[in-house]
Amino acid sequence: MRSSVMLLGPLLGRLHRVNTCYPGGCSIGRRPIDLHLSALEQMGAKICGDEERVEAFAEKLCGTDIRLCFPSVGATENILMAAVAAEGITRIYGAAREPEIQVLCRFLETLGARIDGIGSGFLQVHGGRTLHDGEFTVPGDRIVAGTYLGAVMAAGGEVCLLDAPTDHMAETLCAAQQAGCMIEQKENRLFAKMNGRPLAVNLATGPYPEFSTDLQSVMLAVSCVAQGESWIQENVFEERFATAGELTRLGADIRIEDGTAFVRGKYPLRGNCVQAFDLRGGAALVVAALAAEGESQVHDCFYICRGYEDICRDLTAAGARLSFEGNERKYEENTA
C-alpha cells in the first residue's frame, strides 16, 4: 500500500534501520518517492533496495537544509517525522502546505516537538527533543466532506455535515456555491442544499490552497449532470481521468484533451455496471450513480473503502439508497 513509504522517516529516527515494500497505491499517474529518499539521504541515511523493496540505514540522522522541487505532501510528512528525531535543525524549503501537513505538525508539537512556520512553505524543525505521550483530536476529513457535498450537488437535496473542516475547504465551497449549491455554516455544522441541476463550473487542480486533485473526480461526476458545458484541468496527476471512461458508461459526455476534461452536462444519467480504478474515482462513480436513473453497480469498491470509513452508512443517512455486498462490489440506486 502507498502508506508503507511513510514508515521510512519515523523508523529511521527511532530504530535506525528500515526494510519495507516499495509503495503501491492508486494508479493515478507517476508518484515516485525520489523526494523522500533524497531528503533522508541528505539527513545521513544510506538507501538501497530494488523495484520491490526499500532498505535504509542510519546510525543517526542529522538536521540539514532540504529543498523540495515540488511541494509533495508525502515527502514533507516523511521529512517532518524524521526531523523530530534528528540531531539539530532541519529546514524544509518548498514544503507542502496542505491542512494534513498542519495537522501532523500540531500532533508532533503535542508530543513535544518544536516546529516553526506551520502553514507556510518553509518549515523549521528543532530535532533531538524528547517526545512524550499526549492526547490529540484528529479533525474531520476535508475530502470526505467534499465528496458528500458533491453527492448533494449531483443528486439534489440537502445535507448537514458535522465537524467539516470548513477553514480548509475554501476552494471546494466556492466551487459548490458557483454551481448553485446553497451553503450555510453554523458552529460545527455545514448545511448544503441543492435545488435542481448544478450549474457548470470550470476548475483547475493544484497544490493547496488551490482546488484539490483529490476532489477532481467528484467534481467531474457533478459536471456530468450540470447545466451547460465545463472543463476541468488536472495539473497534479496525469492519470486522474481514468474514471472518465466509466462515467461515459453511465451516459456522461466527456472528452479528454491535453490534461483537460471537457464535459457537456446531461441529465439524468442512466444506471449501469462500472468499475472503480482508484479511491477518489470510485467515490466519483458513487456520486454519479446517485444522479442516475435506475440501479448501478460499482465493482472493485475496495478502493473506496480505503478512504471512507463507511460511505454507505453516511450517504444512507443523507437519504440515498445504497448497499454494500461482498468485499468487492457496491450497489447504488438513485436517491430517495
Image: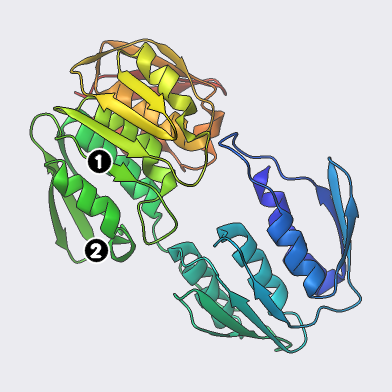
Q: Looking at the image, can residue 287 be seen?
A: no
At mark 2, the secondary structure is loop
Picture coordinates of residue 265 (x, y %)? 21, 23
Residue that badge 2 annotates: 188
Residue at image position (43%, 65%) is 99
Residue at image position (69%, 40%) is 24
* Quarter occupied by the N terminus: top right
Residue at image position (23%, 53%) is 173
Picture coordinates of residue 81 (x, y %)? 67, 71
Can you tell which quarter of the image residue 65 is in? Answer: bottom right
Taking the view exactly as shown, the residue that stands out farthest to the left is 195
Residue that badge 1 annotates: 202
Taking the view exactly as shown, the residue that stands out farthest to the front is 258
Look at the picture and state if 322 lies above or below 88.
Answer: above
- Label 1 is placed on what type of residue? Asn
Picture coordinates of residue 219 (x, y %)? 31, 37
* Quarter occupied by the C terminus: top left
At mark 1, the secondary structure is loop
- From the viewer's side, name the closer residue of 290 and 214: 214
Residue at image position (55%, 22%) is 300
- Label 2 is placed on what type of residue? Asn
How far apart in space, not on screen, are marks 2 and 1 (Cα)?
Answer: 29 Å
Q: Marks 1 and 2: in contact by CB < 8 Å?
A: no
